[in-house]
Image (cartoon, helix red, strand yellow):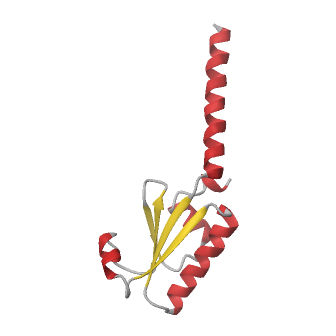
Amino acid sequence: MTKKTQTKNEKTLTACEKAATQSKTELFVFRIYISGTTPQSQRAVRNLHTTCEKYLSSRFELEIIDIYQTPARAKEDQILAVPTLVRAFTLPTRQILGDLSNQSRVLASLGLLSATR
């Protein structure tokens, strides 16, 4: 019986190690919806870039979408206010609104705390 339990534990440990490795290598895809070159839009993009570089290294892609230039995209993603950040990948999608200055709130809201450890 002990041998069977060890095998189960080893399988669980291997699965946990694999999940940890994947979270360290997975790529996050973000879309940030902004309104032109307003100070709040610029601040949100700058804050997001700082947070991603600090916690995700090069494991992210960022698409900046100006709702004045492509309003259909905002409508498609049901964006009601800007700046809005959308985590498009990994699933499930998540959104956060604002200038993204509170890094811990951004990480928690997007479900990224485990990916940064």
- In the displayed image of the protein, which residue is found farthest to the bottom? 38
Left or right of 31? Residue 103 is: right
Residue 42's spot in the image, x, y percent?
A: 55, 87
Q: Position of residue 114 (x, y in %)?
A: 61, 52
60 versus 114 height, above or below: below
Indicate the position of residue 20 as horizontal and vertical percent values: 64, 43
Towards the viewer: 95 or 64 = 64
Quadrant of the rendered image containing residue 66:
bottom left
Figure check: 5 above or below 98: above
Q: Residue at x 65, y 74 (%)?
A: 50
**Total label count?**
0
Residue at (61%, 33%) from the top-left corner? 15
Depth check: give the residue in front, 39 or 72. 72
Q: Residue, x 36% and y 82% (percent of image)?
A: 70
Q: Is residue 26 above or below residue 60?
A: above
Q: Where is residue 57 shown, x and y percent of the image?
A: 68, 63
Quadrant in the picture for residue 35: bottom left
Quarter of the image containing the N terminus?
A: top right
The image quadrant of residue 108 is bottom right
Instruction: Single out the residue that lies furthest toward the top.
Output: 1
- Residue under the point 61% across and 49% down: 23
